[in-house]
Amino acid sequence: MIKGIGIALAGIASAGTVACFAGAKTLFNRTIPRQDVPRVDLSEMADIEKWEEYKKFMVSNSEWLQSQELEHITIKARDGITLHAV
């Protein structure tokens, strides 16, 4: 009788351990960012022609950005702090 209870408790403990491990693994896989993102190819960054295209795009957009009128905005956060932005 006692041996049967011990085996049952061991089975329950094993099942609980497996369930906790599976839950922890699932949580870890969903919350921890993976390093599967593509890496930057440094040889591609050294291509001057691509940088020249990028600079043309950035200069025209920077002129537009600089011509925009600035606006002062304040936001009251939930914790009572007031955030200011220009």
Image: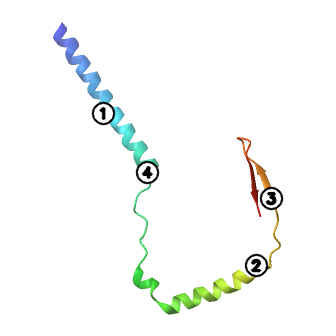
Viewer-nearest of labels 4 and 1? 4
Circle 2 SS class: helix
Viewer-nearest of labels 1 and 3? 3
N-terminal-most mark, 4 or 2:
4
Give the Cα separation between the discs numbered 4 and 2. Answer: 38 Å
Judging by the rendered image, the residue that carries numbered circle 4 is 32
N-terminal-most mark, 4 or 1:
1
9 over 68 or under it: above or below: above
Circle 4 SS class: loop
* Cβ–Cβ under 8 Å for marks 1 and 3: no
Q: Residue at x 20, y 18 (%)?
A: 7
Give the Cα separation between the discs numbered 4 and 3. Answer: 34 Å
Judging by the rendered image, the residue that carries numbered circle 2 is 66
Give the Cα separation between the discs numbered 1 and 3. Answer: 52 Å
N-terminal-most mark, 4 or 3:
4
Judging by the rendered image, the residue that carries numbered circle 3 is 73
Q: Position of residue 63 (x, y in %)?
A: 74, 83
Give the Cα separation between the discs numbered 1 and 2. Answer: 59 Å
N-terminal-most mark, 1 or 3:
1
Viewer-nearest of labels 4 and 3? 3
Q: Amino acid at mark 3?
A: Ile
Viewer-nearest of labels 4 and 2? 2
Residue 18, label in figure? 1
Q: Amino acid at mark 2?
A: Gln
Compared across the picture, whether 3 is left or right of 43 comes to left
User: Badge 3 local density, few (<14 within 10 Å), some, or many (20+)?
Assistant: few
Give the Cα separation between the discs numbered 4 and 1. Answer: 21 Å
Q: Residue at x 43, y 65 (%)?
A: 37
Circle 1 SS class: helix
- Foreground residue among 75 and 6: 75
- Foreground residue among 84 and 1: 84
Quadrant of the rendered structure where residue 72 is?
bottom right
